[in-house]
Image: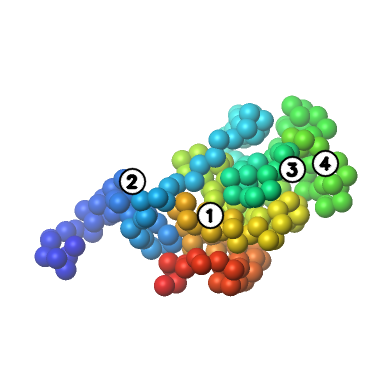
Amino acid sequence: MRKGGDQISDATFKRKLQQYLKDRSIIRIGRNKYCIPDKAVGVYTHEYSAVATEVADLIEENYPLLDFSIFELVQLNEFVNHQLAHNIIFVSVEADIIDFVFETLKERFPGKVLVQPTIDLYHRYWQEGMIILEKLVSEAPMGKPVKWHARVEKMLVDIMADRLILGTVSPSEYPGIYADVFGRYIVDESCMLRYAKRRGAEKEIRELIRTRTNITLRTES
């Protein structure tokens, strides 16, 4: 704008930038990185099940300052060829309060809540609508405007990094999932890769994108 001859202060520029982001004239694809979006690209949203919403309401009521995120398996049905007939609700919460959240949830959902189960326990006690409590990993993307909603960047990483979710989707579906998400939704690439690094999956995800999809990471172009 300044190169075009406009006299503009930093404060005015920041206001303009926020307005452009708000009306989606531009989109954020990384830290201090933006692009003009394809008209077909939207913001990812998911209509949560009644049980997932009840879980969220219960946590917010009892722990109003707690950061947590909810991902449910049926979210993947939008992107996979083999539809998931059963739902599992994964609740990620801050580590130092996970036991308190468990005590709260088990009263409302007796026999359906497990805390950081092993893979064997997960399969042994598996049932429809089971609720899994896990530790919230640092750098986990938090939802906007509803903070507990699982962002698409978190979902892309967790399907390849979460030990309990790993067996749910065939690795042969990963390229299609990534291509579909990047083709239809805004993806904050820097956010996704920071989280992938924290989960030890950054190298694997980069390799998948590079060798098995036609996705070009804009933050690296």
List the residue tagged with mark 2.
22
In terms of image quadrants, where is residue 54?
top right
- The residue under label 3 is 132
Q: How far is the residue under mark 2 from the one under mark 3? A: 35 Å
Type of amino acid at the residue the image marks with label 3: Ile
Residue under pointer 4: 126
Residue 87 — which label?
Answer: none
Q: Earlier in the sequence, mark 1 or mark 2?
A: 2
Q: Which residue is mark 1?
A: 180
Q: Nearer the viewer, residue 164 or 69?
A: 164
Q: Is residue 13 above or below residue 149?
A: below
The N terminus - image quarter:
bottom left
Q: Is residue 164 left or right of residue 30?
A: right
Q: Position of residue 165 (x, y in %)?
A: 72, 52
**Where 87 falls versus 36 (above or below)?**
above
Q: Residue at x 49, y 57 (%)?
A: 182
